[in-house]
Image (spheres, rainbow, N blue to C red):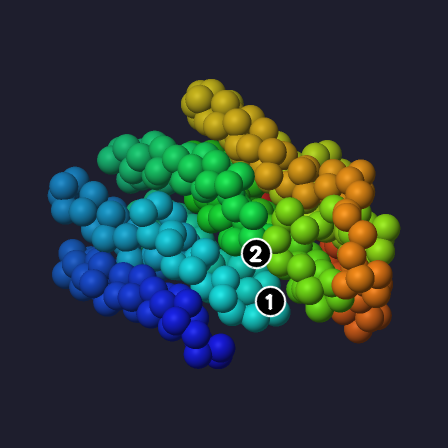
């Protein structure tokens, strides 16, 4: 809302309605019902509802929890995230990569593992239901990203899709899939903050916000576009980049769970990821922009902007090449 424009006010109001409204309407109700059934709100390894035979009530509580976590941007509670792209690019990067949305998916992980537990999730078929919703979000958001010419909004719909990898991994309820989902919290953070930093650098140095305006930009901003390419390849899931570790482990988990349809979902989402990221890279490297006076003065962003981009891009590669340490930590967490 910093710009005081109608669009900014609309985005701010939508943010408050979805996040505060969902929390008060659904999440609080779920917490009250949980306390009424268990007498506690303390997390418990393996779940809090052991010995409680009330499948309809427990299913309703689970739905309330998920609906109350609009921060995770799972459909149909996703619209606030693209609307929030009126925020400054550094704030957008924080919003997408580190802060709000990660709280949402982390909370869903805790609800699945430490409120309901794997056994109860399987017994009530909540895992498969959650996986289906996550899959729909994955595909739909990726499809919608294809139609966006505004770079930040395209990245926003990409985030809606990418967050669902975390939820899908958790919902498959197998160790490999859960590990893939959990590590994607970090993988997505490095990759997406790189992409948003690049979008900010492009705006500062070239005053461009649309994908259609990026033709030939790699010649004038080589470091920024190299980092953008790294972030894009990671989001697509190309080997040696962080996103591949996520998709590989979730695919293994889907096979372990004998749910091959979700391997198909991963493949389809990968094709869609490539369809909205690679055209940006192609346009920047291989198309020639019409000569204009404004573009004559475009040059690489200042080192104060480029250095942080290089650091996060390096992290994206490091997570892809050396994932073992992080996977071992996740294995210890999962027990």
Looking at the rendering, which quadrant does residue 273 occupy?
A: top right
Q: Which residue is disc 1 drawn over?
A: 89
> Which structural element holds mark 1?
helix
Above or below: residue 120 compared with residue 191: above
Q: Which part of the image, by quadrant, shows the N terminus?
A: bottom left
Q: Residue at x 24, y 35 (%)?
A: 124
Report the disc number at residue 132: none
Label whose residue precedes the other's in the sequence (2 or 1)? 1
Q: Residue at x 44, y 79 (%)?
A: 4
Q: Which residue is disc 2 drawn over?
A: 152
Say left or right for 209 vs 119.
right
Residue 21 appears in view: yes
Looking at the rendering, which quadrant does residue 40 occupy?
A: bottom left
> Which structural element holds mark 2?
helix
Q: Residue at x 50, y 62 (%)?
A: 85
Say left or right for 121 vs 174.
left
Q: Are there few (<14), some (14-19), or many (20+) residues within 10 Å of tag 1? A: some
């Amino acid at each position: 809302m910093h710009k005081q424009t109608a669009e900014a006010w609309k985005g701010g109001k939508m943010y408050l309605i979805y996040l505060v409204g969902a929390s008060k309407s659904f999440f609080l109700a779920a917490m009250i019902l949980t306390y009424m059934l268990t007498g506690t709100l303390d997390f418990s390894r393996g779940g809090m509802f052991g010995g409680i035979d009330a499948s309809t009530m427990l299913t309703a509580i689970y739905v309330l929890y998920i609906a109350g976590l609009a921060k995770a941007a799972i459909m149909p509670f996703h619209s606030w995230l693209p609307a929030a792209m009126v925020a400054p690019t550094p704030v957008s990067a924080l919003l997408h990569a580190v802060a709000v949305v990660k709280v949402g998916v982390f909370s869903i992980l805790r609800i699945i593992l430490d409120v309901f537990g794997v056994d109860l999730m399987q017994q009530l078929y909540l895992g498969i239901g959650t996986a289906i919703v996550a899959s729909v979000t994955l595909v739909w958001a990726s499809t919608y990203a294809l139609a966006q010419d505004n770079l930040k909004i395209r990245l926003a719909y990409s985030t809606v899709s990418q967050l669902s990898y975390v939820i899908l991994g958790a919902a498959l309820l197998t160790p490999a899939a859960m590990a893939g989902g959990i590590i994607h919290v970090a993988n997505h953070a490095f990759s997406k903050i790189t992409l948003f930093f690049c979008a900010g650098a492009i705006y500062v140095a070239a005053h461009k916000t649309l994908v259609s305006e990026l033709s030939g930009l790699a010649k004038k901003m080589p470091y920024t576009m190299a980092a953008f390419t790294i972030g894009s390849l990671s989001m697509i899931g190309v080997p040696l980049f962080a996103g591949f570790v996520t998709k590989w482990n979730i695919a293994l988990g889907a096979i372990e769970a004998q749910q091959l349809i979700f391997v198909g979902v991963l493949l389809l989402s990968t094709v869609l990821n490539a369809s909205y990221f690679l055209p940006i890279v192609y346009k920047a490297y291989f198309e020639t922009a019409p000569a204009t006076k404004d573009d004559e003065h475009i040059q690489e962003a200042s080192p104060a902007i480029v250095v942080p981009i290089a650091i996060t891009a390096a992290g994206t590669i490091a997570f892809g090449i050396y994932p073992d340490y992080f996977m071992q930590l996740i294995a210890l967490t999962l027990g």
